Structure formats: structure tokens, C-alpha cells
Amino acid sequence: MGNDNNQLQELTDALRTALARIDAIENTLGALTMLAVRHMPMDKRPGFAEALAALAGMAEKQKDMASATLLTQLQGAAVHGSGG
């Protein structure tokens, strides 16, 4: 029984680590999106945010909710990064 508990704890720890890394990746992508938008010419910024929203819509239609959610968050970062 102790071995089972150890394995369960190892899996729990691995899952927590994986979730923390996923959060870090999402946060980093958002920061990079904001940085990229800030370096774009002002007239290109809305189109970039719209393209991310369109990609999110396509992902949602394909029932890829994880990608749709991330792309929507990146679209928000693009709008925020552009000062909008």
C-alpha cells in the first residue's frame, strides 16, 4: 500500500509541475504578444488582434477549446499591448 501512495504522490507532484509549466508558457506567450504588438506600427496592431480572434474562432469551430481559449487570451494581450 505504501508503494501505491508513493506512486500517487509522485503523479500528483508531476501534475502540479506540469500545470505550473503550462501556466508559465501561457503567461510568457501573453507577454511576448504584448511586446510584439508594442513594436508594431500603430496601423498594424488592430489587424494582428483581429487575426488572433479569427484563429480563436476557427479553433472553437473545430472543437479545440484549449487552443481557442489561449488564442482569445492572446488576442486580449494584443489589445492590451496596443493600448486599446
Image (tube, grey):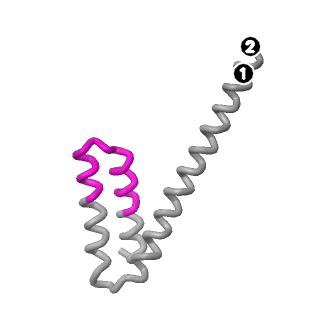
Q: Residue 20: where, in percent of width, then height?
A: 60, 48
User: What distance separates the C-alpha of mark 1 from that of mark 2?
Assistant: 6 Å
Q: Residue 33: where, in percent of width, then height?
A: 43, 69
Q: Are marks 1 and 2 in contact (CB under 8 Å)?
A: yes
| Residue 63 is covered by the magenta coloring | yes
Q: Amino acid at mark 1?
A: Asn
Task: Return the residue found at the far right.
Answer: 2
| Residue 68 is covered by the magenta coloring | yes
Which residue range is magenta in the image?
A: 55-74
The quarter of the rendered structure image containing the C terminus is: bottom left
Principal secondary structure, stretch drawn in magenta: helix
Quarter residue 38 falls in: bottom left
Residue under label 2, please give it.
1
Quarter residue 2 falls in: top right
Q: Is residue 19 left or right of residue 57?
A: right
Indicate which disc residue 61 carries: none
Indicate which disc residue 5 carries: 1
Quarter residue 45 falls in: bottom left
Q: Residue 24: where, in percent of width, then height?
A: 56, 56
The quarter of the rendered structure image containing the N terminus is: top right
SS at circle 1: helix
- Residue at 69 percent of width and 32 percent of height: 10
Label 1 crowd (10 A; few <14 / some 14-19 / many >=20) = few
How many labels were placed on the picture? Answer: 2
- Residue at 58 percent of width and 51 percent of height: 21
Label 2 crowd (10 A; few <14 / some 14-19 / many >=20) = few
Is residue 21 positioned above or below 37 on the image? above
Q: Amino acid at mark 2?
A: Met
